[in-house]
Amino acid sequence: MQRRAVIVAVTALLVSVLSGCSSTSQSKASTSSPSFAADSINARCQAQDWPQPMPDIQGEPFDPLGKDLKCFGNIQAVAPDGHDVMTDPGSGLGAWTVVSSTPGPGAKVRITTPITLELRRG
């Protein structure tokens, strides 16, 4: 009977120690992982007052993750040949300049509002 009590106590102690170790390593991993940062940005975007005015980014370099566009989740960035730069990894996102946007600057938009940006090289 004493042997069984010792086994139960040791098992409980091991479970306690191991669960403490895993929660510590999980919290350290999650604070430095990209998904944590993305979740944090998403939470900050969701917490803002919506709708917001569409920013005036005409003539600006195209940066879908920049401060002006990071909260918008439905962006189509169209090159002069008609292809969507957002879905073309070889196009080089930083190589484009915004010519115009639909909706235009100042229009009230939500996070999910479809936004089309006309781009040009350079």
Image (cartoon, rainbow, N blue to C red):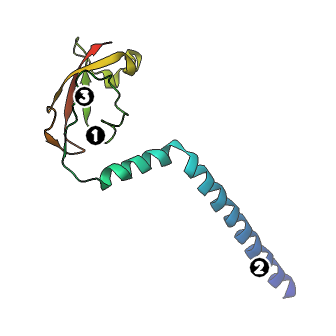
Q: Which residue is mark 2?
A: 8
Instruction: Give the residue furthest to the bottom.
Output: 1
Judging from the image, what secondary structure is the residue with disc 3 in? Answer: loop
Q: CA distance from mark 3 to mark 1?
A: 14 Å
Count of all numbered marks drawn on residues in the image: 3
Q: Label 1 is placed on what type of residue?
A: Phe
Question: Considering only vertical position in the picture, is 108 above or below 100?
Answer: below
Question: Considering only vertical position in the picture, is 37 above or below 86?
Answer: below
Q: Which residue is mark 3?
A: 57
Q: Which residue is mark 1?
A: 72
Q: Label 3 is placed on what type of residue?
A: Ile
Judging from the image, what secondary structure is the residue with disc 2 in? Answer: helix
In depth, the one of 82 and 52 nearer the eye is 52
Q: x and y percent of residue 67 in the render? A: 35, 37
Q: Label 2 is placed on what type of residue?
A: Val
Question: Is 105 left, or right, of 28 in this rendering?
Answer: left
Q: x and y percent of residue 15 in the render? A: 71, 69
Q: Quadrant of the N terminus?
A: bottom right
- Mark 2 and mark 3 residues within 8 Å of each other at the beta carbon: no
Q: x and y percent of residue 66 in the render? A: 37, 33
Judging from the image, what secondary structure is the residue with disc 1 in? Answer: loop
Q: Quadrant of residue 55?
A: top left
Q: Quadrant of the C terminus?
A: top left
Between tags 1 and 2, which lies in front?
Answer: 1
- Residue positioned 33% across, 24% down in the render: 87
In depth, the one of 44 and 92 nearer the eye is 44
